[in-house]
Amino acid sequence: MRTAMIGGTAALLLAVGMVPAQASSAAAPLRLQEVEVVAGAPHADATYCDHIMIDCGYVGVHATFSGLSGRVSSQDSWEERQGYVTGSARVSRVYGCESAEGVRLGHLDTTVSENVRLGPRRGMTFTLPTDADTVPAEAYAFLEDAQPRNCPAGTQPMMYELRVQRVALTMNSSLRTVPSAEYRVKGRDRWQGAVPTPFGE
């Protein structure tokens, strides 16, 4: 079951039975039980792109991996039980220009697409539990400004849409019984609105 809602809310994919695209050892990889893809809205009052304030929008992926039962022991060190998620996503943003009267000048709309890398926020990892079957993990991409700077003098550069799709994840683990693995994700999300871009004309 997958639900998608417009306006920066999450597109949720219940990944029952989803198997990884590739695993790194003979041990069975974890199953990607659930994943949430988020197109994070840019800040309306941004004056510059800042990765802490997330002014220019972001991509967020919240995943839950299952199949841990019996794999992680209290004898495993804390360091061995650390893991993190990396990956990639296709991002498309619609930029445009607004007149002094607040009218969108549709003929100046430009779509900018790029592939972005996903990684843990501020280096945060997850810890494999010894007494549970699932573990949550997150990965992000904080976007730089990509406004094409094609707005005429006297108009306001704007961002109108952010789309996220084609997400791929890698669950990175150093524990022998929990192999690193790659996963293809079908979830996607879209934000739509009207936000001034931070760099002006």
Image: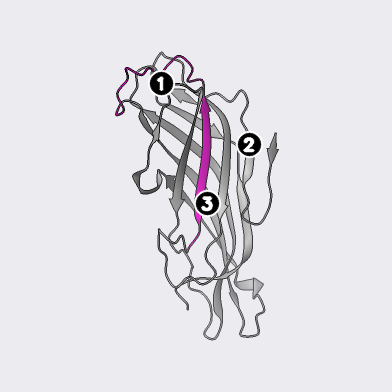
Name the residue beneath numbered marker 2. Answer: 13
Mark 1 and 2 residues: CB-CB less than 8 Å, in contact? no
68 in magenta = yes
As helix, strand or loop, the secondary structure at mark 3 comes to: strand
- Say the numbered circle drawn on residue 46: none
Height in image: 42 above or below 61?
Answer: below
Which amino acid, mark 1? Val
Residue 161 image position (x, y, % from top left): 60, 60
Residue 162's quadrant in the figure? bottom right
- Say the numbered circle drawn on residue 91: 3
| Position of the N terminus by quadrant | top right
Residue 77's quadrant in the figure? top left
Name the residue beneath numbered marker 1. Answer: 178
| 3 or 1: mark nearer the eye | 1
For label 1, the crowd category at 10 Å Cα-Cα, with few meaning under 14, some 14 to 19 and many 20 or more, is many
N-term mark: 1 or 2: 2
For label 3, the crowd category at 10 Å Cα-Cα, with few meaning under 14, some 14 to 19 and many 20 or more, is many
Name which residue lies at 61% across and 57% down: 191
Name which residue lies at 32% across and 20% down: 76
Residue 187 image position (x, y, % from top left): 60, 40
Magenta stretch prevailing secondary structure = loop
As helix, strand or loop, the secondary structure at mark 2 comes to: strand
